[in-house]
Image (cartoon, helix red, strand yellow):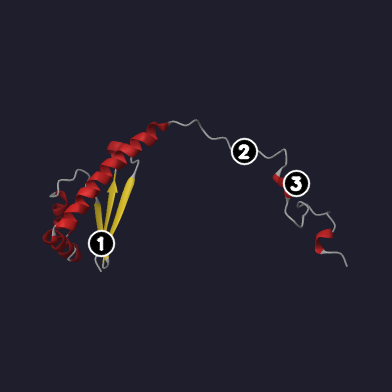
């Protein structure tokens, strides 16, 4: 009996080759995708906006890491669902981009967004655990 790859090729699908389909990989009808011209303008502005977000996030993280009282008050307010106090405490650090804050029983999520000023180009999400 012949091996299964010696069956009749009367079907509409391409023939099977036991070691790979080499014929179709190098077919002259194979076309490559054309990419648009590279314009680094938007990429560069995204990098600038991300640098601002990271600077604000770094400043906020430094405040959380250095001040036990600030961290304790922030955690307490978040666990009590007092988002007005959480937002006020984050604004009191002096950062420009105020993150959207959510919390879970395990920690705090900070979502920094570049906003309309930078064409919504970038986001930075920080997840901080407390248990």
Residue closest to the eye, 47 or 118? 47
Relative to 1, say whether 53 is above or below.
above
* C-beta proximity under 8 Å, tags 2 and 1: no
Check the picture and name the quadrant holding the C terminus. Answer: bottom left
Q: Counting other residues with Cα less than 10 Å from the Cα at mark 1, is it few (<14), some (14-19), or many (20 or more)?
A: some
- The CA distance from mark 3 to mark 1 is 56 Å
Residue drawn at point x = 34 percent, y = 39 percent:
47
Relative to 55, say whether 70 is above or below.
below
Kindly state the secondary structure of the residue where label 2 is placed.
Answer: loop
Residue drawn at point x = 65 percent, y = 38 percent:
31
Q: Position of residue 84 (x, y in %)?
A: 15, 56
Residue drawn at point x = 20 percent, y = 51 percent:
60
Q: Position of residue 65 (x, y in %)?
A: 19, 57
Q: Position of residue 78 (x, y in %)?
A: 19, 62
Q: Nearer the viewer, mark 2 or mark 1?
A: 2
Q: Earlier in the sequence, mark 3 or mark 1?
A: 3
Kindly state the secondary structure of the residue where label 3 is placed.
Answer: helix
> Which of the numbered marks, if any, corresponds to residue 32?
2
Q: Nearer the viewer, mark 3 or mark 1?
A: 3
Q: Residue furthest front?
A: 66
Q: Quadrant of residue 119?
A: top left
Relative to 29, say whether 16 is above or below.
below
Q: Earlier in the sequence, mark 3 or mark 2?
A: 3
Q: Earlier in the sequence, mark 2 or mark 1?
A: 2
- Name the residue beneath numbered marker 1: 103
> Which of the numbered marks, if any, corresponds to residue 12?
none
Residue drawn at point x = 14 percent, y = 52 percent:
88
- The CA distance from mark 2 to mark 1 is 46 Å
On the rendered structure, is 94 left or right of 25?
A: left
- Name the residue beneath numbered marker 3: 23
On the rendered structure, is 30 left or right of 90?
A: right
């Amino acid at each position: 009996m012949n091996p299964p790859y010696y069956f009749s090729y009367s079907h509409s699908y391409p023939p099977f080759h036991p070691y790979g389909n080499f014929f179709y990989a190098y077919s002259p009808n194979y076309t490559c995708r054309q990419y648009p011209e590279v314009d680094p303008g938007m990429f560069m502005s995204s990098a600038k906006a991300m640098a601002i977000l990271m600077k604000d996030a770094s400043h906020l993280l430094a405040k959380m890491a250095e001040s036990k009282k600030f961290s304790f008050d922030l955690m307490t307010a978040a666990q009590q669902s007092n988002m007005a106090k959480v937002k006020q405490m984050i604004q009191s650090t002096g950062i420009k981009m105020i993150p959207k804050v959510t919390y879970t029983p395990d920690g705090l999520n900070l979502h920094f967004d570049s906003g309309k000023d930078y064409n919504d180009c970038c986001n930075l999400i920080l997840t901080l655990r407390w248990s």
